[in-house]
């Protein structure tokens, strides 16, 4: 089998492990179907294999470690969507893919289909360490300090079926980036890691206790310069302290963020250091040899110098203004002069954010093979990235994306919304997220209008669990239930990054259409009050929240 670019390539022992897991789960499914297992008994077993019971059917969540798959894997996902679902999948903020209409009896067959292309659904749900996410530009971006993917893979292997951390007080999420800016929302994770090169090897800055949901918290730095040798031991100690002292008596206070807030970051750091002092650190030592062994399982692109590739791209932009607009919004500078990073928005106006059809998956697989070494990246903002596109081939790629209805030029703009499935699927939700997302997308669908508004992100959640990260949106929407009717709270001022902030509620909840109108008035207020070149959040910080609150609720 040809080695795949960009991610860990399985060995035979990896495939044997998956086969053993599938056979075990197949037996558990059969016992549930014949009544030998009750739903309460079966629930923790199915969750560890990525299966939720939602409002109308089972949902299957499939792992995409650190967000990277290859074209054969994407074609397999397309096949699964056609054969076992309803012809589409949904990319999530944890760089996974979900299928929402799965029959339980088909689950073992789906797992075998996945295993045939070295994929699985292990630990995509349940009270365990979930899929480790990473920077979607890893190994490609011109500004990158260090490629974090090898260490993301090491964390994946360390955390998979960890005997001590498979049943934590609550779900646990880790993100790692090697970018000078925080492109993984590290401060909103249970553990966020920022990697950088040091004089004697990689160093890792670690944050703990971040998270959204019912009690949103920005994570705090616990260590600034953990060495590569000490990385696993440090993470092990952090999790041991949480596993020992995290609350199990109250679901709403069980996350690590509550423990850190309760005892304080200083006390938590001291507890971790005390744990480290008692550990046999040699067992966790991450030696250069171990790292190199994992790195050897990664295939890397063979870049070529293309004379005048940049000139070809510039000429094509001049000839086609629509292409030039897409290049401006939906590309990122590559570390190699002949290449560019292409960001593919899954947010066409009026469509469901993060959804991708069978035909689009197959089409993206074809384009990735033709233009990006067969490598596809899924982002935590529910988009797709082709990381290594030759500049002189970008126009051909764009035309291929147009044919798939995937050439919307809105990365980072108001149409590039993040949205959870909401009450259309989720039994926990209070409101439907998808219809309001489609209405907002249609309201601001014009590319020129989006460009005029500039950088602004909207995040939508159907309930307080915040799967749509509404607290981190410049404008956030939270679905609430008011006497059996769906309403939305508007939050203002959230953001990811180095200066991460949590948005605050602007005023009373509004009905769906009223909310869309209120957002339109907020945007109009911004456009009339902003200074030249001033971004939305900068205007909010300069003039305060009151002008936006006044216009948002002008009709009530």
Image (cartoon, rainbow, N blue to C red):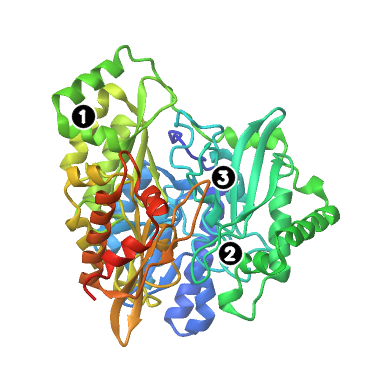
Distance from disc 1 to disc 3, alpha carbons, whole Å, reads 33 Å
Residue at x 38%, y 46% (from the top left corner): 73
Q: Is residue 422 above or below residue 240?
A: below
Tag 2 residue: 128
Tag 3 residue: 152
* Whether residue 37 can be seen here: no
Local secondary structure at mark 3: helix
Please tell me in which quadrant of the rendered image residue 52 appears: bottom left
Q: Residue 408 in the image: x percent, y percent? A: 22, 44
Q: Residues within 10 Å of mark 1 (few under 14, many from 20)?
A: some
Asked if the residue at tag 2 contacts the one at tag 1, i.e. Cβ–Cβ closer than 8 Å, the answer is no
Quadrant occupied by the N terminus:
top left
Tag 1 residue: 396
Residue 232: which disc?
Answer: none
Q: Residue 20 in the image: x percent, y percent? A: 55, 59
**First in sequence: mark 3 or mark 2?**
2
Q: Residue 336 in the image: x percent, y percent? A: 42, 22
Q: Residues within 10 Å of mark 3 (few under 14, many from 20)?
A: many
Residue positioned most to the top: 307
């Amino acid at each position: 089998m040809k080695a795949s670019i960009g991610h860990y390539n399985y060995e035979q022992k990896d495939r044997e492990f998956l086969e053993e897991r599938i056979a075990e789960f197949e037996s558990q499914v059969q016992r549930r179907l014949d009544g030998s297992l009750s739903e309460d008994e079966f629930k923790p077993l199915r969750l560890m294999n990525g299966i939720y019971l939602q409002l109308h059917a089972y949902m299957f969540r499939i792992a995409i470690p650190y967000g990277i798959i290859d074209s054969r894997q994407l074609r397999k996902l397309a096949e699964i969507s056609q054969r076992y679902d309803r012809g589409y999948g949904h990319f999530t903020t944890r760089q996974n893919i979900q299928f929402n209409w799965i029959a339980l009896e088909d689950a073992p067959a789906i797992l075998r289909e996945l295993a045939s292309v070295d994929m699985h659904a292990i630990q995509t749900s349940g009270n365990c360490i979930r899929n480790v996410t990473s920077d979607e530009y890893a190994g490609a971006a011109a500004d990158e300090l260090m490629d974090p993917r090898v260490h993301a893979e090491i964390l994946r292997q360390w955390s998979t079926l960890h005997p001590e951390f498979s049943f934590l007080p609550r779900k646990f999420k880790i993100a790692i980036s090697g970018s000078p800016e925080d492109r993984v929302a590290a401060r909103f994770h249970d553990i966020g890691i920022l990697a950088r090169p040091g004089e004697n090897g990689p160093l890792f800055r670690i944050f703990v206790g971040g998270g959204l949901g019912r009690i949103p918290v920005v994570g705090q730095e616990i260590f600034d310069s953990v060495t590569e040798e000490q990385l696993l031991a440090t993470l092990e100690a952090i999790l041991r302290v949480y596993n020992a002292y995290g609350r199990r008596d109250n679901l709403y206070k069980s996350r690590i963020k509550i423990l850190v807030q309760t005892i304080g970051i200083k006390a938590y750091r001291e507890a971790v250091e005390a744990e480290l002092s008692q550990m046999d650190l040699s067992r966790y030592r991450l030696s250069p040899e171990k790292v190199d062994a994992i790195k050897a399982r990664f295939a890397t692109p063979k870049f070529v110098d293309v004379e005048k590739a940049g000139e070809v791209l510039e000429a094509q932009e001049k000839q086609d203004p629509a292409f030039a607009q897409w290049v401006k919004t939906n590309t990122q500078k590559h570390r190699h002069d002949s290449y560019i990073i292409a960001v593919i928005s899954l947010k066409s106006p009026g469509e469901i954010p993060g959804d991708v059809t069978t035909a689009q998956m197959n089409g993206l697989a074809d384009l990735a093979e033709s233009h990006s070494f067969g490598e596809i990246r899924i982002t935590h903002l529910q988009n797709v990235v082709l990381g290594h596109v030759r500049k002189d081939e970008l126009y051909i790629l764009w035309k291929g994306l147009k044919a798939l209805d995937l050439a919307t030029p809105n990365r980072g703009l108001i149409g590039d919304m993040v949205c959870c499935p909401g009450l259309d699927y989720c039994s926990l939700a209070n409101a439907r997220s998808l219809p309001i997302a489609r209405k907002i997308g249609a309201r601001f669908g014009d590319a020129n209008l989006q460009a005029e508004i500039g950088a602004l992100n909207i995040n939508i959640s159907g309930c307080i669990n915040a799967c749509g990260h509404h607290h981190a949106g410049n404008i956030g929407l939270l679905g609430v239930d008011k006497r059996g009717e769906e309403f939305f709270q508007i939050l203002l001022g959230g953001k990811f990054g180095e200066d991460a902030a949590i948005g605050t509620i602007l005023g009373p909840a509004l009905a769906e259409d009223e909310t869309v109108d209120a957002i339109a008035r907020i945007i109009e207020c911004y456009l009339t009050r902003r200074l030249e070149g001033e971004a939305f959040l900068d205007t909010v910080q300069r003039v305060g929240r009151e002008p936006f609150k006044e216009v948002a609720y002008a009709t009530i």
